[in-house]
Amino acid sequence: MKKMVFSLLVFSVLIASISNKPLIAQNQSSRFSKQHKSHFLKEHLKQTEEMLIQALQSGLPSMRSTAAQTTRELEQIFPSEKFTSLISPLCQIVSDENADIQSRVLSALALDGLHSDEGDKVIFNVAKTTSIEPLKVICDAMARESFKAEEKISLK
């Protein structure tokens, strides 16, 4: 009985001492900030955008896909940035019926993440007109709100 009470007392003291310390995860910086110098990345963001535009306009499907995926990642790293210079090249890829499916899907996802009227219109139109079923389904899912407001889009 004494051992049980003593164990309970020791356990309570341990719990009390742990709960008085701040949580370690809250005091540490994010994994991204440990691995990368985001201020350095932000300084070179304009140059990165220019390089992405060149890659998106490339005739190589792998370059286009990589650039579209990089755009998606930059949107997540820098959510306050607009990346408006990338909208037009992404729209061209999504609209191009001869472009490879992977580039078109990644570009549509990147456009959706940019939240631009121009990109939303292209996604909406591709959802209605493309002959490629997987792309149609993906664009339809992204443009569901646009389908509800089809008359508003056609009036603009």
Image: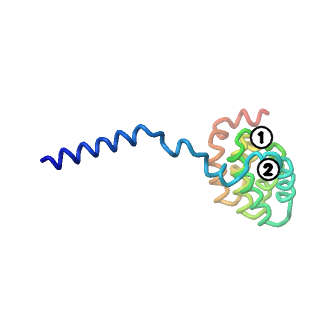
Tell me the residue that label 1 is attached to.
82
Q: Earlier in the sequence, mark 2 or mark 1?
A: 1
Q: Nearer the viewer, residue 145 or 77?
A: 77
What amino acid is at disc 1? Lys
Residue 51 point in image, percent of width and height: 85, 56
Left or right side of 92 for 20: left
What amino acid is at disc 2? Cys
Tell me the residue that label 2 is attached to.
91
Distance CA(mark 2)–CA(mark 1): 15 Å
SS under mark 2: helix
Residue at (63, 37) in percent of width and height: 148
Which residue of the protein is positioned furthest toward the left in this rendering? 1
Q: Nearer the viewer, residue 77 or 25?
A: 25
Residue 9 point in image, percent of width and height: 24, 42
Give the colour scheme of this rendering: rainbow
- Residue count near mark 1 (Cα–Cα under 10 Å), binned few <14, some 14–19, many ≥20: few
Left or right side of 33 for 55: right
Residue at (71, 62) in percent of width and height: 102
